[in-house]
Amino acid sequence: MTAAVAEQSHKDPFTDKQFPMPVGRFLAEAEKHLNRGDIVLSRGNTLSSRLIRRATGGFFSHAALVFLVPQPEEGFSNTFLVESVSSGVGIASLKGWIAGRRPIADIAIVRVEQPGLDEDYFRQVRGLMLDYVKSGYDYSRAFRLGLSFLFASRLGWFSMKEGGRTSMRAAIRQTRSRPVRWVPPQFICSGFIQYGYVAALARRGEEASRVVFKDGLSELDRDGLLATTPEDIARSDKVTWRFAVRRGWVHQVKDYASARRVISGAKS
């Protein structure tokens, strides 16, 4: 190994002088910075985002999975996310979240890095989630909104009664026990991602507990897995922090605390 190569291999990635980087440049070369299977955690200024953060006691209110990174040779140059929202499971553009004069969200990007979690594994994760895209959600818009409001009300009640860390699980548990279930479990965005990670590893016949984000939670606990919140993912020791994006700029971050500082606009 030459001295130049040795120096490059030991370079601290958090001293990269490219960052902070404008969002436009980051998106244009996203294939250099993102992996399929990365998790995007977000928070916005909408009422629903604030209510979710309040109910779950978390800094983030939503989560999505990087589904495709730009492949110009295949005819597309955007980064696409798979997410679960009130209208069902669908595909969104990362550009639509963070670009423009008024981005709709500030985000952080984390990655799960473990031996054996290769491209084939993340392909299975994405495939399991993709299989639910726009399936089984044929309610009218008004009925969907009613379901979302009822579930949000139930979640808020349990957050006051049991605390933010357990409110999502309690709300799902009671919802699933009712004759008329207010929402499909897939409506819980971060729980849906947790489902994909666990199910893909289980299908390979491997120990799925190593991709369970919340400490002490069994991979066999369906309600617990579906109740995984964005905050559970953010606080997990199974993720590596990569980037935080705020107001048109992308910053490299090494942990949860530094991501919060960037997104909160705090000075270093």
Image (cartoon, rainbow, N blue to C red):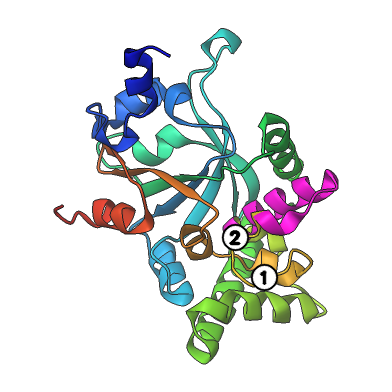
Residue 159 left/right relative to 105: right
Quadrant of the image occupied by residue 188: bottom right
Res. 107 mark: none
Name the kind of residue labelled 2 in the image. Answer: Phe
Q: Could one spot residue 105 in this view of the protein?
A: no
Real-space Cα distance between discs 1 and 2?
A: 8 Å
Looking at the rendered structure, the number of numbered marks drawn on it comes to 2
Name the kind of residue labelled 1 in the image. Answer: Leu
Q: Could one spot residue 27 in this view of the protein?
A: yes
Please tell me which residue is depicted at 68% across the width and 64% down the height of the picture.
226
Label 1 secondary element: loop
Label 2 secondary element: loop
Residue at the bottom extreme of this rendering: 161
Please name whichever residue, 64 or 93, is drawn nearer the observer in this view of the structure. Answer: 64
Q: Main secondary structure of the magenta part?
A: helix
Res. 213 mark: 2
**Mark 1 vs 2: CB contact within 8 A:** yes
Please provide the residue range marked out in magenta: 190-210
Please name whichever residue, 258 or 185, is drawn nearer the observer in this view of the structure. Answer: 258
The N terminus appears in which quarter of the rendering?
top left
Residue 49 left/right relative to 12: right
Q: Which residue is mark 1?
A: 217
Residue 18, placed above or below residue 242: above
Q: Position of residue 155 (x, y in %)?
A: 56, 78
Q: Position of residue 224 (x, y in %)?
A: 68, 71
Residue 16 left/right relative to 68: left
